[in-house]
Image (cartoon, rainbow, N blue to C red):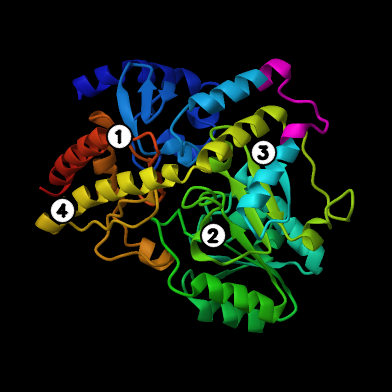
Amino acid sequence: MNSVRTRYAKSIAYAKRIAEVIPGGVDSPFRAFHEVGGDIVFFDRAKGSKLYDLDGNIYIDYLGAWGPAILGHCPDAVVKKCQETLAKGPVFGAPHIYEMEMAELVIAAVPSVEKIRFVNSGTEAVMSAIRLARGFTGKDTIIMFEGCYHGHSDATLASNGHQSSSGIPDGARAATILAQFNNLNSVEDLLQKHKNQIAAVIVEPVAGSMGVVAPQSEFLAGLRSLCNQYGALFIMDEVLTGFRVAFGGAQNLYQVDADITCFGKALGGGMAIGAYGGRKHIMDRLQPEGDVYQAGTFSGNPLTMAGGIATLELLADSRVYSTLEARTAQLFAGLAKAIESHNYPVQLPRVGSMFSLVFAQKPVQNFQDSLTIDAQTFANFFHYLLDNGVYLPPSAVDAACLSSEHSEAEIDTTIEIMTRAFKYCFG
């Protein structure tokens, strides 16, 4: 115990200090390790596949900043373009060329997106997309899926399996109804029951907050068809999957288009970004052309757009995704060998470089399945990795992400450490 406290001595000291000025010592709850226990870790810098904490400890990083670090931390080309742009001014509150260039790049990569608006986070993108869907259809009710996460606005936090917040009006809860992920019948039942009331069906094409749950065959295509049949808009929340699981996102991977698509995370290569886009006749309902309001001082600011442009230009090289696939496959091959040889109760779901280690007896296909995940054993696993220089999301259910900067040697090291961690957890 003393050696562990020595390893994190500066972080422990700062944790006491920061708690006096920031609630819980963090600006986002998961950073507090509230699901895995233990003292929070303060980081000093990041580069490539590595994180460096205040005490000088080095970690092979699989958090990926919760998704943005698809090219690793601080890619040289992204840093250079952002530095050049910062020198000209990080925000104008007025139009500039970079937001046009960024929009053109996204539209070229995602066929269903004909026009796009940039905002500052995934939460803001989803919140705005839902308002747009309601304004466009003249209907109020949204169908979501148990266990999917769409940010922390009232409209989405109200009823998605993350019901851990007070302060949400009953009206927000009443306007959101739940279906079961990977279950088309549950969606059709709700559409029939609430005819002429459903503005949109919103889904994470790959659920990233109950392990990594891929869509079953025909699930996404079935949702597209049902939305057409019942006059509801189909919203894909690709904040996590967009440009992560494939260039252009999950809808390019699965060949299913959306009416409105939400982006964030990997789209900005480390800059704070969100975006939502779709068909022209839908997007044109936004003010100033239409009657749906959305605005933001920092929306589409030059600094963020510069980072996004540099990121998309790099991601357009197919070798990036070949590397991501090769490294993730290497990691999973090594872990599968350890798990299968000892029959450990661990599942290994992944879609591209988005993956999870799910401590459960059986694969997770929906939110109810996710309730069987052994969070305590994962917490033990997490801390063993942390103490040995591997950083995972501090949550038993949230997706991990690999970057194109992870080397074969780092993957081998990770397999070795994780194999020891399995033995530590299961004996």
Q: Around disc 4, counting alpha carbons within 10 Å, would you say few (fewer than 14), some (14 to 19), or many (20 or more)?
A: few
Chain part drawn in magenta: 85-98
Residue drawn 58% across the image and 73% down it: 223
Residue 73 place in picture, x, y as percent: 45, 29
Q: Earlier in the sequence, mark 4 or mark 2?
A: 2
Q: What amino acid is at disc 1? A: Ser
Instruction: Look at discs 4 and 2 and give the one toward the viewer.
Output: 2
Q: CA distance from mark 1 to mark 4?
A: 20 Å
In this figure, which residue is indicated by the disc labeled 3? 120
Q: Secondary structure at mark 3?
A: loop
Residue type highlighted by circle 4: Lys
In front: mark 1 or mark 3? 1
Relative to the observer, which residue lies in front, 49 or 382?
A: 49
Foreground pick, 170 / 417: 417
Q: Which residue is mark 2?
A: 252
**Residue under label 1:** 407
